[in-house]
Amino acid sequence: MSNQYVIEPNLTFIDEVIGLGGDTLKKCFQCATCSVACPIAPENSPFPRKEMIAASWGLKDKLVGSADIWLCHECGDCTALCPRGAKPGATLSAIRSYAISEYSGSVPVLGKLSKMVTDPKKLALLTAVPAVWFALMAFITVFMGGTMEKIFHAIGLHWAHVTDAPIAQARFVSTWLVDFTFVPVFNISILIFVYTLYKMLTDMHTNAVLEGKTDKEKLDYKEYFKTIPTVLKKVLAHTQFNECGENKSRGTAHMMVLFGFIGCLIVTTIGFFFLYILGKPGPYSQLWPFKWLGNIAGISIVMGSALMIKERLSKTDLSAYKDWYLLGLVLTLGATGLMTQMARLAGMEYVTYAIYYVHLIAIFHLFAYLPFSKLAHIVYRLAAMTYAEYANRK
Ligand code: SF4
Ligand code: SF4
Protein backbone atom coordinates (compact mmCIF):
# COMPACT_ATOMS: atom_id res chain seq x y z
CA MET A 1 0.00 0.00 0.00
CA SER A 2 1.31 3.45 -0.89
CA ASN A 3 1.75 5.78 2.08
CA GLN A 4 0.48 8.87 0.29
CA TYR A 5 -2.89 10.24 -0.78
CA VAL A 6 -3.80 10.79 -4.38
CA ILE A 7 -6.12 13.80 -4.48
CA GLU A 8 -9.14 12.88 -6.55
CA PRO A 9 -11.94 15.40 -5.96
CA ASN A 10 -15.34 13.76 -5.93
CA LEU A 11 -17.81 16.38 -7.11
CA THR A 12 -20.85 14.18 -6.48
CA PHE A 13 -19.73 13.84 -2.86
CA ILE A 14 -19.58 17.64 -2.47
CA ASP A 15 -23.09 18.01 -3.94
CA GLU A 16 -24.51 15.27 -1.72
CA VAL A 17 -22.94 16.69 1.45
CA ILE A 18 -24.41 20.09 0.54
CA GLY A 19 -27.82 18.44 0.02
CA LEU A 20 -27.60 16.64 3.37
CA GLY A 21 -27.23 19.88 5.34
CA GLY A 22 -23.62 20.94 4.64
CA ASP A 23 -24.77 23.80 2.38
CA THR A 24 -22.38 26.30 4.00
CA LEU A 25 -19.16 24.33 3.58
CA LYS A 26 -17.88 26.47 0.69
CA LYS A 27 -17.92 29.56 2.91
CA CYS A 28 -14.94 28.31 4.93
CA PHE A 29 -11.79 30.39 4.42
CA GLN A 30 -9.60 28.26 6.69
CA CYS A 31 -9.12 30.68 9.58
CA ALA A 32 -9.03 27.77 12.12
CA THR A 33 -11.21 29.51 14.71
CA CYS A 34 -13.31 26.33 14.84
CA SER A 35 -10.26 24.23 15.77
CA VAL A 36 -9.63 26.49 18.74
CA ALA A 37 -13.30 26.35 19.79
CA CYS A 38 -13.80 22.62 19.38
CA PRO A 39 -13.60 20.82 22.75
CA ILE A 40 -12.49 17.56 21.14
CA ALA A 41 -9.79 18.94 18.81
CA PRO A 42 -6.40 17.41 19.65
CA GLU A 43 -3.61 19.93 20.31
CA ASN A 44 -1.65 19.06 17.20
CA SER A 45 -4.52 18.55 14.75
CA PRO A 46 -6.69 21.33 13.28
CA PHE A 47 -10.05 19.58 13.70
CA PRO A 48 -12.56 20.41 12.20
CA ARG A 49 -10.75 22.90 9.93
CA LYS A 50 -8.99 20.16 7.99
CA GLU A 51 -12.29 18.30 7.58
CA MET A 52 -13.81 21.48 6.13
CA ILE A 53 -11.08 21.79 3.55
CA ALA A 54 -11.23 18.08 2.73
CA ALA A 55 -15.01 18.39 2.24
CA SER A 56 -14.71 21.40 -0.05
CA TRP A 57 -12.08 19.52 -2.09
CA GLY A 58 -14.37 16.50 -2.35
CA LEU A 59 -11.97 14.10 -0.59
CA LYS A 60 -14.65 11.51 0.01
CA ASP A 61 -12.47 8.55 1.00
CA LYS A 62 -10.46 10.58 3.49
CA LEU A 63 -13.62 11.77 5.25
CA VAL A 64 -16.01 8.82 4.99
CA GLY A 65 -13.37 6.44 6.34
CA SER A 66 -12.26 8.72 9.16
CA ALA A 67 -12.97 8.01 12.83
CA ASP A 68 -12.78 11.75 13.59
CA ILE A 69 -16.07 12.67 11.88
CA TRP A 70 -17.89 10.47 14.41
CA LEU A 71 -16.24 12.06 17.44
CA CYS A 72 -18.05 15.36 16.80
CA HIS A 73 -21.29 15.45 18.83
CA GLU A 74 -22.65 18.54 17.07
CA CYS A 75 -22.29 20.79 20.10
CA GLY A 76 -22.25 23.85 17.84
CA ASP A 77 -19.36 25.65 19.60
CA CYS A 78 -17.45 25.90 16.30
CA THR A 79 -20.50 27.10 14.39
CA ALA A 80 -21.20 29.83 16.95
CA LEU A 81 -17.69 31.30 16.52
CA CYS A 82 -17.10 30.77 12.80
CA PRO A 83 -16.65 34.27 11.31
CA ARG A 84 -17.93 33.08 7.91
CA GLY A 85 -21.07 31.25 9.05
CA ALA A 86 -19.64 28.04 7.60
CA LYS A 87 -21.27 25.76 10.23
CA PRO A 88 -18.63 23.02 10.52
CA GLY A 89 -20.84 21.07 12.97
CA ALA A 90 -23.63 20.81 10.36
CA THR A 91 -21.10 19.90 7.65
CA LEU A 92 -19.70 17.07 9.78
CA SER A 93 -23.24 15.86 10.46
CA ALA A 94 -23.91 15.82 6.70
CA ILE A 95 -20.68 13.86 6.12
CA ARG A 96 -21.75 11.33 8.75
CA SER A 97 -25.11 10.90 7.00
CA TYR A 98 -23.27 10.40 3.73
CA ALA A 99 -21.03 7.80 5.43
CA ILE A 100 -24.09 5.89 6.74
CA SER A 101 -25.56 5.84 3.19
CA GLU A 102 -22.22 4.82 1.72
CA TYR A 103 -21.67 1.84 4.05
CA SER A 104 -25.29 0.70 4.31
CA GLY A 105 -25.66 1.22 0.55
CA SER A 106 -22.93 -1.37 -0.01
CA VAL A 107 -25.01 -4.09 1.67
CA PRO A 108 -25.97 -6.77 -0.86
CA VAL A 109 -29.68 -6.80 -1.88
CA LEU A 110 -30.86 -4.36 0.83
CA GLY A 111 -28.45 -1.54 -0.06
CA LYS A 112 -31.15 0.36 -1.99
CA LEU A 113 -32.90 1.09 1.29
CA SER A 114 -30.16 3.56 2.20
CA LYS A 115 -31.30 6.07 -0.45
CA MET A 116 -34.99 5.43 0.30
CA VAL A 117 -34.69 6.14 4.02
CA THR A 118 -33.16 9.58 3.35
CA ASP A 119 -35.76 10.48 0.70
CA PRO A 120 -38.96 12.09 2.10
CA LYS A 121 -40.86 11.01 -1.01
CA LYS A 122 -40.31 7.36 -0.05
CA LEU A 123 -41.66 7.71 3.51
CA ALA A 124 -45.18 6.66 2.49
CA LEU A 125 -43.88 3.51 0.77
CA LEU A 126 -41.60 2.62 3.71
CA THR A 127 -44.58 3.01 6.04
CA ALA A 128 -46.98 1.10 3.79
CA VAL A 129 -44.85 -2.07 4.05
CA PRO A 130 -45.31 -2.58 7.83
CA ALA A 131 -48.87 -1.13 7.66
CA VAL A 132 -49.98 -3.86 5.25
CA TRP A 133 -48.00 -6.53 7.09
CA PHE A 134 -49.50 -5.76 10.50
CA ALA A 135 -52.99 -5.43 9.02
CA LEU A 136 -52.50 -9.00 7.79
CA MET A 137 -51.16 -10.09 11.20
CA ALA A 138 -54.20 -8.48 12.88
CA PHE A 139 -56.53 -10.28 10.48
CA ILE A 140 -54.86 -13.61 11.28
CA THR A 141 -55.00 -12.95 15.05
CA VAL A 142 -58.60 -11.76 15.17
CA PHE A 143 -60.06 -14.38 12.83
CA MET A 144 -57.69 -17.29 13.38
CA GLY A 145 -56.48 -16.75 16.96
CA GLY A 146 -58.16 -19.91 18.24
CA THR A 147 -56.70 -21.99 15.41
CA MET A 148 -53.23 -20.64 16.14
CA GLU A 149 -53.53 -21.67 19.77
CA LYS A 150 -54.61 -25.16 18.72
CA ILE A 151 -51.57 -25.42 16.42
CA PHE A 152 -49.24 -24.27 19.23
CA HIS A 153 -50.75 -26.78 21.62
CA ALA A 154 -50.51 -29.55 19.00
CA ILE A 155 -46.74 -28.99 18.73
CA GLY A 156 -46.34 -29.11 22.50
CA LEU A 157 -46.42 -25.41 23.42
CA HIS A 158 -49.11 -25.87 26.05
CA TRP A 159 -48.37 -22.56 27.73
CA ALA A 160 -49.00 -20.74 24.46
CA HIS A 161 -52.35 -19.07 24.86
CA VAL A 162 -53.12 -15.50 23.89
CA THR A 163 -54.32 -13.95 27.16
CA ASP A 164 -57.28 -13.98 29.51
CA ALA A 165 -57.46 -10.17 29.74
CA PRO A 166 -60.52 -8.56 28.09
CA ILE A 167 -58.42 -5.84 26.43
CA ALA A 168 -54.87 -6.73 25.46
CA GLN A 169 -52.65 -5.88 22.50
CA ALA A 170 -52.17 -9.62 21.94
CA ARG A 171 -55.89 -9.94 21.14
CA PHE A 172 -55.35 -7.58 18.20
CA VAL A 173 -51.93 -8.79 16.95
CA SER A 174 -50.72 -11.99 18.60
CA THR A 175 -47.44 -11.63 20.49
CA TRP A 176 -46.15 -14.68 18.62
CA LEU A 177 -46.74 -12.94 15.31
CA VAL A 178 -45.13 -9.73 16.59
CA ASP A 179 -42.03 -11.68 17.60
CA PHE A 180 -42.18 -13.73 14.39
CA THR A 181 -41.80 -10.36 12.61
CA PHE A 182 -39.35 -8.49 14.80
CA VAL A 183 -36.89 -11.18 15.84
CA PRO A 184 -35.74 -11.89 12.22
CA VAL A 185 -35.84 -8.18 11.27
CA PHE A 186 -33.73 -7.26 14.30
CA ASN A 187 -31.22 -10.02 13.58
CA ILE A 188 -30.90 -8.98 9.95
CA SER A 189 -30.14 -5.44 11.16
CA ILE A 190 -27.40 -6.83 13.41
CA LEU A 191 -25.88 -8.76 10.49
CA ILE A 192 -25.95 -5.59 8.37
CA PHE A 193 -24.10 -3.74 11.13
CA VAL A 194 -21.48 -6.50 11.40
CA TYR A 195 -20.91 -6.25 7.63
CA THR A 196 -20.76 -2.43 7.48
CA LEU A 197 -18.73 -2.02 10.68
CA TYR A 198 -16.09 -4.39 9.39
CA LYS A 199 -15.73 -2.25 6.25
CA MET A 200 -15.79 0.95 8.23
CA LEU A 201 -13.14 -0.15 10.74
CA THR A 202 -10.90 -1.36 7.92
CA ASP A 203 -11.18 2.08 6.25
CA MET A 204 -10.62 3.90 9.54
CA HIS A 205 -7.47 1.97 10.24
CA THR A 206 -6.15 2.44 6.70
CA ASN A 207 -6.73 6.20 6.98
CA ALA A 208 -5.18 6.36 10.46
CA VAL A 209 -2.04 4.56 9.20
CA LEU A 210 -1.78 6.87 6.17
CA GLU A 211 -2.11 9.95 8.37
CA GLY A 212 0.41 8.64 10.90
CA LYS A 213 -2.25 8.55 13.65
CA THR A 214 -1.29 5.07 14.73
CA ASP A 215 1.85 3.02 14.62
CA LYS A 216 -0.14 -0.24 14.68
CA GLU A 217 0.14 -1.68 11.22
CA LYS A 218 -2.77 -4.10 11.64
CA LEU A 219 -6.00 -3.58 13.52
CA ASP A 220 -5.87 -5.82 16.57
CA TYR A 221 -9.55 -6.73 17.10
CA LYS A 222 -8.88 -8.33 20.48
CA GLU A 223 -7.39 -5.09 21.83
CA TYR A 224 -10.12 -3.10 20.06
CA PHE A 225 -12.95 -5.02 21.79
CA LYS A 226 -11.17 -4.69 25.14
CA THR A 227 -11.50 -0.90 24.78
CA ILE A 228 -15.31 -0.96 24.46
CA PRO A 229 -16.12 -0.86 28.24
CA THR A 230 -13.99 2.30 28.71
CA VAL A 231 -15.82 4.02 25.87
CA LEU A 232 -19.24 2.82 27.03
CA LYS A 233 -18.63 4.50 30.40
CA LYS A 234 -17.95 7.81 28.60
CA VAL A 235 -21.03 7.41 26.41
CA LEU A 236 -23.32 6.66 29.36
CA ALA A 237 -21.92 9.61 31.33
CA HIS A 238 -22.24 11.86 28.25
CA THR A 239 -18.77 13.19 29.02
CA GLN A 240 -18.45 14.88 25.61
CA PHE A 241 -21.75 16.74 25.95
CA ASN A 242 -20.57 18.16 29.27
CA GLU A 243 -17.69 19.83 27.45
CA CYS A 244 -20.11 21.78 25.25
CA GLY A 245 -20.46 25.51 25.66
CA GLU A 246 -23.13 26.42 23.11
CA ASN A 247 -25.71 23.60 23.28
CA LYS A 248 -25.06 22.11 26.71
CA SER A 249 -28.79 21.53 27.31
CA ARG A 250 -28.86 19.09 24.35
CA GLY A 251 -26.91 16.64 26.52
CA THR A 252 -29.82 16.29 28.98
CA ALA A 253 -32.37 15.55 26.22
CA HIS A 254 -29.97 13.14 24.52
CA MET A 255 -29.37 11.34 27.80
CA MET A 256 -33.13 11.02 28.45
CA VAL A 257 -33.69 9.38 25.08
CA LEU A 258 -30.66 7.08 25.42
CA PHE A 259 -31.59 5.88 28.91
CA GLY A 260 -35.23 5.58 27.82
CA PHE A 261 -34.22 3.17 25.07
CA ILE A 262 -31.95 1.23 27.45
CA GLY A 263 -34.92 0.95 29.85
CA CYS A 264 -37.19 -0.32 27.04
CA LEU A 265 -34.56 -2.88 26.05
CA ILE A 266 -34.41 -4.20 29.63
CA VAL A 267 -38.22 -4.35 29.86
CA THR A 268 -38.51 -6.15 26.50
CA THR A 269 -35.92 -8.71 27.62
CA ILE A 270 -37.84 -9.31 30.87
CA GLY A 271 -41.07 -9.62 28.83
CA PHE A 272 -39.43 -12.31 26.68
CA PHE A 273 -38.39 -14.16 29.82
CA PHE A 274 -41.90 -14.05 31.29
CA LEU A 275 -43.58 -15.16 28.07
CA TYR A 276 -41.19 -17.75 26.67
CA ILE A 277 -39.53 -19.11 29.83
CA LEU A 278 -42.25 -18.73 32.47
CA GLY A 279 -45.20 -18.98 30.05
CA LYS A 280 -46.95 -15.89 31.48
CA PRO A 281 -48.47 -13.68 28.77
CA GLY A 282 -49.30 -10.01 29.53
CA PRO A 283 -50.75 -7.62 30.32
CA TYR A 284 -48.85 -7.50 33.60
CA SER A 285 -49.84 -5.67 36.78
CA GLN A 286 -48.97 -1.99 36.97
CA LEU A 287 -47.51 -2.71 40.40
CA TRP A 288 -44.66 -4.80 39.00
CA PRO A 289 -41.29 -2.97 39.12
CA PHE A 290 -40.54 -3.72 35.46
CA LYS A 291 -43.81 -2.02 34.50
CA TRP A 292 -42.62 1.06 36.40
CA LEU A 293 -39.34 0.87 34.54
CA GLY A 294 -41.22 0.62 31.22
CA ASN A 295 -43.36 3.64 32.07
CA ILE A 296 -40.41 5.73 33.24
CA ALA A 297 -38.49 4.75 30.08
CA GLY A 298 -41.45 5.74 27.87
CA ILE A 299 -41.84 9.12 29.61
CA SER A 300 -38.10 9.70 29.33
CA ILE A 301 -38.16 9.04 25.56
CA VAL A 302 -41.16 11.34 25.01
CA MET A 303 -39.72 14.18 27.11
CA GLY A 304 -36.21 13.85 25.66
CA SER A 305 -37.39 13.81 22.04
CA ALA A 306 -39.85 16.69 22.68
CA LEU A 307 -36.97 18.75 24.13
CA MET A 308 -34.83 17.96 21.07
CA ILE A 309 -37.65 18.98 18.72
CA LYS A 310 -38.16 22.22 20.68
CA GLU A 311 -34.44 22.95 20.43
CA ARG A 312 -34.42 22.34 16.65
CA LEU A 313 -37.51 24.50 16.12
CA SER A 314 -35.87 27.38 18.00
CA LYS A 315 -33.06 27.53 15.44
CA THR A 316 -33.35 29.85 12.50
CA ASP A 317 -31.96 27.34 9.98
CA LEU A 318 -34.12 24.33 9.21
CA SER A 319 -32.79 20.87 10.06
CA ALA A 320 -32.43 18.27 7.32
CA TYR A 321 -35.08 15.57 6.66
CA LYS A 322 -32.85 12.89 8.24
CA ASP A 323 -33.02 14.75 11.58
CA TRP A 324 -36.81 15.17 11.49
CA TYR A 325 -37.30 11.55 10.48
CA LEU A 326 -35.29 10.38 13.48
CA LEU A 327 -36.88 12.77 15.97
CA GLY A 328 -40.38 12.07 14.66
CA LEU A 329 -39.79 8.33 14.92
CA VAL A 330 -38.44 8.51 18.48
CA LEU A 331 -41.35 10.69 19.63
CA THR A 332 -43.90 8.42 17.90
CA LEU A 333 -42.37 5.33 19.50
CA GLY A 334 -42.48 6.78 23.01
CA ALA A 335 -45.88 8.47 22.69
CA THR A 336 -47.71 5.52 21.09
CA GLY A 337 -46.18 3.10 23.62
CA LEU A 338 -47.48 5.16 26.53
CA MET A 339 -50.83 5.98 24.91
CA THR A 340 -51.54 2.33 24.08
CA GLN A 341 -51.25 1.52 27.76
CA MET A 342 -53.30 4.51 28.88
CA ALA A 343 -56.12 3.66 26.45
CA ARG A 344 -56.09 0.03 27.63
CA LEU A 345 -56.27 1.05 31.29
CA ALA A 346 -59.12 3.44 30.42
CA GLY A 347 -61.02 0.50 28.90
CA MET A 348 -61.04 1.96 25.35
CA GLU A 349 -60.56 -1.25 23.38
CA TYR A 350 -60.59 -0.02 19.78
CA VAL A 351 -58.55 3.10 20.59
CA THR A 352 -55.97 0.83 22.24
CA TYR A 353 -55.68 -1.31 19.12
CA ALA A 354 -55.54 1.68 16.76
CA ILE A 355 -52.67 3.28 18.70
CA TYR A 356 -50.92 -0.07 19.09
CA TYR A 357 -51.08 -0.53 15.31
CA VAL A 358 -49.21 2.78 14.83
CA HIS A 359 -46.76 1.70 17.55
CA LEU A 360 -45.97 -1.55 15.70
CA ILE A 361 -45.38 0.35 12.46
CA ALA A 362 -42.99 2.69 14.31
CA ILE A 363 -41.09 -0.27 15.82
CA PHE A 364 -40.75 -1.74 12.33
CA HIS A 365 -39.25 1.56 11.13
CA LEU A 366 -36.84 1.43 14.07
CA PHE A 367 -35.61 -2.12 13.52
CA ALA A 368 -35.84 -2.52 9.74
CA TYR A 369 -34.50 0.88 8.71
CA LEU A 370 -32.09 1.40 11.64
CA PRO A 371 -28.86 0.54 9.71
CA PHE A 372 -29.87 2.97 6.94
CA SER A 373 -31.11 5.96 8.96
CA LYS A 374 -29.46 8.59 11.13
CA LEU A 375 -30.19 6.39 14.13
CA ALA A 376 -27.31 4.19 12.97
CA HIS A 377 -25.02 6.90 14.31
CA ILE A 378 -25.36 5.28 17.76
CA VAL A 379 -23.57 2.17 16.48
CA TYR A 380 -21.11 3.93 14.15
CA ARG A 381 -20.17 6.54 16.75
CA LEU A 382 -19.53 3.90 19.40
CA ALA A 383 -17.33 1.99 16.93
CA ALA A 384 -15.39 5.14 15.99
CA MET A 385 -14.97 6.32 19.59
CA THR A 386 -13.67 2.87 20.47
CA TYR A 387 -11.28 3.03 17.54
CA ALA A 388 -10.03 6.49 18.61
CA GLU A 389 -9.46 5.22 22.15
CA TYR A 390 -7.78 2.06 20.89
CA ALA A 391 -5.48 3.95 18.51
CA ASN A 392 -4.73 6.73 21.01
CA ARG A 393 -6.10 9.42 18.70
CA LYS A 394 -3.61 12.22 18.17
S1 SF4 B 1 -15.22 26.64 9.35
FE1 SF4 B 1 -15.28 28.77 9.91
S2 SF4 B 1 -14.00 28.88 11.75
FE2 SF4 B 1 -13.52 26.93 10.75
S3 SF4 B 1 -11.77 27.36 9.46
FE3 SF4 B 1 -13.61 27.62 8.21
S4 SF4 B 1 -14.08 29.78 8.32
FE4 SF4 B 1 -12.69 29.35 10.01
S1 SF4 C 1 -19.84 20.74 16.62
FE1 SF4 C 1 -18.67 20.73 18.53
S2 SF4 C 1 -17.62 18.75 18.54
FE2 SF4 C 1 -18.34 19.10 16.47
S3 SF4 C 1 -16.60 20.01 15.41
FE3 SF4 C 1 -17.88 21.68 16.19
S4 SF4 C 1 -17.04 22.21 18.18
FE4 SF4 C 1 -16.21 20.21 17.61
Image (spheres, rainbow, N blue to C red):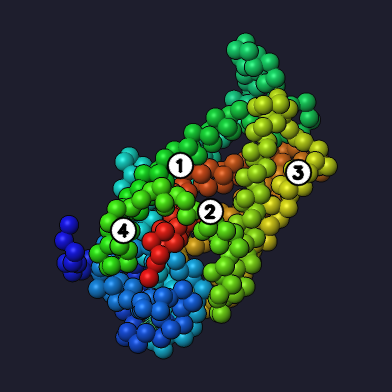
x and y, in percent, of residue 140 in the image: 59, 25
Q: Earlier in the sequence, mark 4 or mark 1?
A: 1
Quadrant showing the N terminus: bottom left
Q: Residue 346's spot in the image, x, y percent? A: 81, 43
Mark 2: few/some/many CA within 10 Å (<14, 14-19, 20+):
few
Which residue bears the numbered disc 1? 190
Tell me which label, 4 or 3, sits earlier in the chain. 4
Whether residue 29 can be seen here:
yes
Q: Residue at x 45, y 42 (%)?
A: 189
Query: Could you tell me how far apart the alpha carbons at marks 4 and 1 are, in whole angstroms?
Result: 28 Å
- Spatial CA distance of label 4 from label 2 is 21 Å
Q: Which of marks 3 and 2 precedes in the sequence? A: 2
- Indicate the amino acid at tag 4: Lys
Amino acid residing under circle 2: Pro
Front position among marks 4 and 3: 4
Distance of label 4 from label 3 (alpha carbons): 48 Å
| Label 4 close to label 1 by CB (< 8 Å) | no
* Label drawn at residue 154: none
Q: Nearer the viewer, residue 205 or 148?
A: 205
Residue 229 image label:
2
